């Protein structure tokens, strides 16, 4: 129950490794989930791959049969992606729920056997917060990280490979965009996690104050301590609000800065790509497939940068 040290915080490597031990009873379900995630990541490359025949075959060459086949394949691709997304998220949610249940049962069993000295050192609100709130937050953060690492890693690799196949010279230019985006995402992710950790501690403190006020309501009334209790609760509740606002602003700031850098960089790549396409007489479908592949790479790359933040 001594989970106030850094290893207990969402986002730490020690927490993820510890949670992996709870996966043993669900290895079969976890294997199916990982397979579904990998297939989902692989299917991402199908989107730009189908853009080329749709444009070149259907609109440029006026081949209606080619257009019908390409559109049918696109519909089937998104149907497959929907099934894989439902399977992977549903299965991961089920595994996450089972792990939360196992953790809570284990923590409660441990609470029943802890010495009185432990309860003297820790407030009841803090203990309750760990069992009711922190377990869910840590497990949710870990399962989300697993999905990001598996699915987005495959997505980035496959899309970059396809973009390299279409135009290896211009694909290398994407590495001009990635470094600043990754650094910014990591910086903002660090801030969000710090605020989230502080928010967890404050919620535990608020639970403690609330519990004391409810249990000791007679004492509060007898000693006319209503004003003091109100100030104490309002101060903690306002601190939680401030942390939540900081998390929102950090996320919005990350999006705004990354989008600005992306817009400037992509504009330059579009100019170079257009000039290259004119010189090499590449088709519109070829060019748009290249842009689609690069565009689809940015979001998973940013999520990976945040997930890999220690």
Image (tube, rainbow, N blue to C red):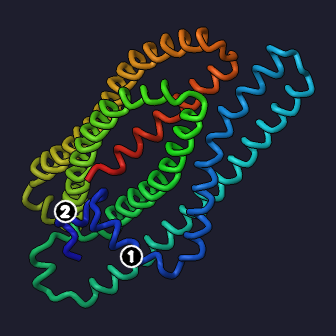
Residue 150 is marked as none
Q: Position of residue 176 (x, y in %)?
A: 36, 27
Residue 103 is marked as 1
Quarter of the figure that contains the N terminus:
bottom left
Q: Residues within 10 Å of mark 2 (few under 14, many from 20)?
A: few
Question: Residue at position x 17%, y 66% from top?
Answer: 5
Circle 2/circle 1 CB separation < 8 Å: no
Secondary element type, mark 1: helix
Task: Name, please, the residue furthest toward the front.
Answer: 280
Q: Of callouts 2 and 1, which one flags the residue occurring earlier in the amino acid sequence?
A: 2
Question: Residue at position x 28%, y 33% from top?
Answer: 184
In the picture, measured across the screen, residue 103 lies left or right of residue 208, that is right
Which of 247/120 is in front?
Answer: 247
Secondary element type, mark 2: helix
Q: Position of residue 158 (x, y in %)?
A: 56, 44
Which of 224/92 is in front?
Answer: 92
**Residue 3 in view (yes/no):** yes
Does residue 296 lie above or below 121 as drawn?
Answer: above
- Residue bearing the label numbered 2: 6
Q: Nearer the viewer, mark 2 or mark 1?
A: 2
Question: Residue at position x 9%, y 54% from top?
Answer: 224
Q: Residues within 10 Å of mark 1 (few under 14, many from 20)?
A: some
Does residue 150 lie above or below 245 as drawn?
Answer: below
**Total count of labels:** 2
Q: Position of residue 110 (x, y in %)?
A: 29, 85
In the picture, measured across the screen, residue 151 lies left or right of residue 172, that is right
Q: Position of residue 117 (x, y in %)?
A: 10, 84
**Residue 244 in view (yes/no):** no
Which of 35/103 is in front?
Answer: 35
């Amino acid at each position: 129950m001594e989970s106030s040290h850094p290893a207990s915080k969402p986002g730490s490597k020690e927490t993820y490794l510890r949670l992996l031990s709870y996966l043993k009873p669900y290895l079969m379900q976890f294997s199916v989930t990982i397979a579904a995630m990998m297939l989902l990541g692989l299917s991402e490359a199908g989107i730009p791959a189908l853009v080329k025949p749709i444009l070149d075959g259907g609109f440029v060459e006026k081949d209606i049969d080619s257009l019908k086949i390409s559109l049918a394949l696109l519909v089937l691709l998104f149907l497959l992606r929907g099934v894989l997304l439902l399977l992977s998220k549903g299965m991961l949610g089920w595994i996450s729920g089972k792990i939360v249940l196992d953790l809570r049962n284990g923590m409660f069993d441990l609470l029943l056997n802890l010495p009185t000295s432990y309860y003297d050192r820790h407030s009841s609100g803090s203990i309750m917060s760990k069992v009711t709130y922190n377990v869910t937050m840590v497990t949710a953060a870990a399962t989300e990280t697993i999905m990001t690492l598996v699915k987005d890693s495959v997505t980035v690799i496959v899309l970059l490979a396809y973009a390299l196949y279409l135009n290896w010279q211009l694909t290398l230019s994407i590495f001009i965009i990635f470094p600043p985006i990754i650094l910014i995402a990591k910086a903002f992710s660090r801030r969000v996690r710090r605020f989230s950790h502080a928010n967890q501690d404050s919620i535990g403190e608020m639970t403690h104050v609330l519990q004391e006020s409810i249990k000791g309501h007679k004492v509060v009334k007898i000693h006319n301590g209503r004003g003091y209790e109100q100030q104490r609760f309002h101060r903690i509740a306002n601190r939680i609000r401030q942390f939540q606002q900081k998390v929102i602003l950090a996320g919005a700031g990350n999006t705004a800065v990354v989008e600005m850098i992306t817009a400037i960089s992509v504009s330059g790549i579009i100019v170079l790509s257009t000039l290259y396409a004119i010189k090499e007489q590449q088709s519109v479908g070829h060019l748009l497939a290249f842009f689609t592949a690069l565009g689809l790479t940015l979001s998973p790359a940013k999520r990976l940068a945040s997930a890999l933040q220690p």
